[in-house]
Image: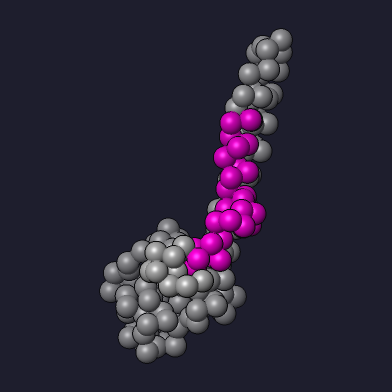
């Protein structure tokens, strides 16, 4: 996530960072999603960002709040995590709209007397709605307060 923060501070896209560092765009995406990066990749990124290689070691990238290097604060980590969840939901919603639209056209062209596409739209729609409920926290009884109460209850502490 430190890589993503540095990239955004410079105003670069993942493609631009990949070109500047000599890495592939997919490698940049993997590193920003928290997967381990090779030493060579981290050295290339450190050179592009003009920072010390030690700031981009796997420990500081994977656990930025635990390292001594200037990493992300807890609020930033949570914000990045939430934005990734939002991006995942919007991608899911876009896929749903495109695929169901194409299937609807196919259904109307092949067999307009039976609208089987409604079954697909309904089933997948339930998945999209549950994804939205998780991302936008529409289920109050499974939120952070609920988790805290359950932990306190399991530990035998008074609420």
Q: Position of residue 127 (x, y in %)?
A: 57, 40
Q: Is residue 119 positioned above or below 81 on the image?
A: above
Q: Position of residue 80 (x, y in %)?
A: 54, 69
Q: In the depicted view, which residue is nearer to us: 77 or 105?
A: 77
- Name which residue lies at 53% across and 62% down: 146
Residue lying furthest left: 39
- Name which residue lies at 63% across and 43% down: 129
Asked whether, in this view, residue 18 is left or right of residue 96, the answer is left
Q: Is residue 98 visible?
A: yes
- Name which residue lies at 55% across and 77% down: 75
> For the magenta stretch, what is the residue range?
121-149
Asked whether, in this view, residue 36 is left or right of residue 3, the answer is left
Q: Residue 3 falls in which quadrant of the image?
A: bottom left
Q: In the depicted view, which residue is nearer to us: 30 or 43?
A: 30
Q: Residue 41 falls in which quadrant of the image?
A: bottom left
Q: Is residue 68 positioned above or below 142 on the image?
A: below
Q: Total of numbered circles in the picture? A: 0
- Name which residue lies at 33% across and 86% down: 54
Q: Position of residue 33 (x, y in %)?
A: 44, 63
Q: Is residue 124 magenta?
A: yes
Q: Is residue 59 positioned above or below 119 on the image?
A: below
């Amino acid at each position: 996530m430190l890589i993503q923060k540095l990239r955004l501070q410079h105003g670069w896209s993942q493609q631009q960072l990949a070109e500047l560092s000599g890495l592939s765009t997919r490698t940049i995406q993997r590193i920003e999603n928290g997967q381990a990066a090779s030493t060579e990749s981290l050295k290339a990124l450190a050179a592009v960002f003009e920072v010390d290689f030690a700031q981009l070691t796997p420990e500081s990238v994977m656990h930025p709040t635990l390292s001594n290097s200037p990493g992300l604060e807890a609020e930033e980590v949570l914000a990045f995590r939430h934005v990734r969840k939002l991006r995942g939901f919007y991608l899911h919603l876009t896929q749903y709209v495109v695929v169901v639209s194409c299937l609807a056209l196919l259904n109307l062209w092949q067999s307009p007397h039976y609208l089987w596409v409604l079954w697909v739209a309904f089933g997948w729609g339930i998945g999209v709605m549950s994804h939205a409920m998780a991302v936008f926290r529409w289920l109050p009884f499974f939120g952070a307060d609920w988790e805290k109460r359950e932990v306190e209850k399991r530990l035998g502490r008074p609420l």
